[in-house]
Amino acid sequence: MPNSAMIIDPALAGGGIGLTPTQNQPTTTNCCDDKLDELIRYLSISVPAKLEELTLRIDAVAAHWQEASRIGKEVHNALISSLSANPSRFLIGGVEYDNFAKLNERLQEVVFDTLDRVEETKQFILDEVSKATVFDNIEIVE
């Protein structure tokens, strides 16, 4: 190809090689332009829709977190108030509950009863081991 110099097309210089013949004919064809236009249309519709979907999901998670936080604070306040000696009722998430004082008393009874049984069993084992241990020849060495 004598005398056919290639030059860089200024319109395509930033996006790739973009070499064109000296006649300055563009290297892209209508097919590529159509595909590029189709991609641009798709992105101009798809990206905002995806962003909107993500925004809605984030808002839903934030609303759920706020509700959980509010209910957690109600439960915290109810548990604090249940420690008082005065029997009362309270609301958690719109549901009415009795005071936890009776439940707490029963739980403490069970815990202390269990601890007593553990101590009794421990003492029984120590006594049985002491009875079974025979010391025959004990020497005190100085």
Image: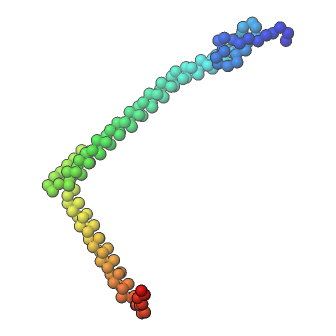
Residue found farthest to the top: 23
Q: How is the image coloured?
A: rainbow
Residue 55 higher or lower than 114, as above or below: above
Residue 120 place in picture, x, y as percent: 30, 77
For this view, does 57 lie left or right of residue 15? left
With 6 as the anchor, is 71 left or right in this view? left
What residue sits 83% from the left and 8% below the top? 3
Q: Residue lying farthest left? A: 86
Toward the viewer: 117 or 98?
117
Number of numbered discs present?
0
Q: Quadrant of residue 86?
A: bottom left
Residue 79: x and y in percent read: 24, 51
Which residue sits at x=74%, y=11%? 7
- The percent position of residue 62, horizontal first and vertical second, equals 37, 36
Question: At x 59% / y 17%, what residue is drawn?
Answer: 37
Residue at far front of view: 142
Quarter of the picture holding the C terminus: bottom left
Residue 100 makes an appearance in the image? yes
Is residue 96 visible in the rendered image? The answer is no
Which quadrant holds residue 129? bottom left
Residue at the extreme bottom: 136
Q: Quadrant of the N terminus?
A: top right
Question: Relative to 115, is 35 above or below?
Answer: above
Instruction: Tell me where residue 113 appears, x and y as whole percent.
Output: 26, 71
Rendered residue at 23%/67% (across/down)? 109
